[in-house]
Image: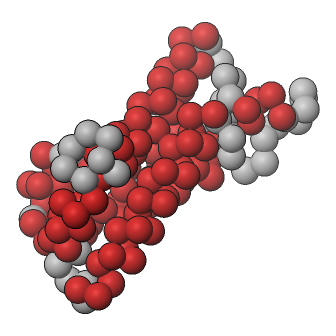
């Protein structure tokens, strides 16, 4: 791998993490309109779900959107975190498509986020990561 490839992988990892953490910060009131606004949006995105399920979906999404990017930031269990991020964003993209139509998901680049997370999961090694530090030399990371 070239140093440019390693840098690109690091930037992809960081960009994917920030794409998750920014909306979490918004819904927790660090910037943006806060939790109530997020619950209303979650109800719209999950228009096909029972209203009673929306708060649980919102909490589950927020927990996953906090844990997965933190793992990506430090590079721990990177492949699994990337696969989780890819699956979560793909689920979000499909829910958006069902509720609003495909244009909304395309406008917010949710399919691109999912594809980039899937791409990150295919990288054979993550040089600047906790995974690289914890992996004994000469032993490839478990797939």
- At x 9%, y 65%, the residue is 101
In the depicted structure, whether residue 49 falls above or below residue 13: below
Q: Where is residue 128 in the image (x, y as percent from the top left)?
A: 67, 22
- Front residue of 123/97: it is 97
- At x 35%, y 44%, the residue is 25
Q: In this view, does 38 lie to the left or right of 65?
A: left
Q: Position of residue 33 (x, y in %)?
A: 19, 50
Looking at the figure, which quarter contains the N terminus? top right
Q: Is residue 71 left or right of residue 69?
A: right
In the depicted structure, whether residue 87 falls above or below residue 12: below
- Front residue of 36/53: it is 36
Q: Position of residue 29 (x, y in %)?
A: 30, 47
Answer whether residue 112 is visible to the viewer in this image: no
- At x 48%, y 30%, the residue is 14
Q: How many labels does the image show?
A: 0
Q: In this view, does 140 lie to the left or right of 79?
A: right
In the depicted structure, whether residue 66 falls above or below residue 127: below
- Front residue of 51/92: it is 51
Q: In which quarter of the image is residue 98?
A: bottom left
Q: Which residue lies furthest to the top in this view?
A: 3
In the depicted structure, whether residue 138 falls above or below residue 51: above
Question: Which color mode does the image show?
Answer: secondary structure
Answer whether residue 43 is visible to the viewer in this image: yes
Q: Position of residue 2 (x, y in %)?
A: 62, 12
């Amino acid at each position: 791998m070239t140093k440019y490839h390693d840098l690109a992988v690091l930037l992809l990892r960081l960009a994917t993490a920030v794409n998750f953490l920014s909306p979490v910060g918004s819904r927790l009131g660090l910037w943006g309109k806060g939790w109530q606004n997020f619950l209303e949006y979650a109800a719209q995105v999950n228009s096909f779900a029972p209203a009673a399920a929306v708060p649980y979906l919102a909490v589950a999404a927020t927990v996953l959107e906090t844990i997965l990017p933190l793992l990506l930031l430090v590079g721990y269990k990177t492949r699994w975190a990337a696969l989780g991020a890819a699956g979560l964003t793909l689920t979000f993209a499909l829910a958006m498509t069902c509720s609003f139509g495909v244009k909304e998901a395309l406008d917010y680049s949710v399919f691109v986020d999912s594809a980039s997370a899937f791409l990150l999961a295919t990288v054979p090694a993550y040089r600047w990561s906790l995974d690289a530090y914890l992996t004994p030399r000469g032993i490839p990371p478990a797939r």
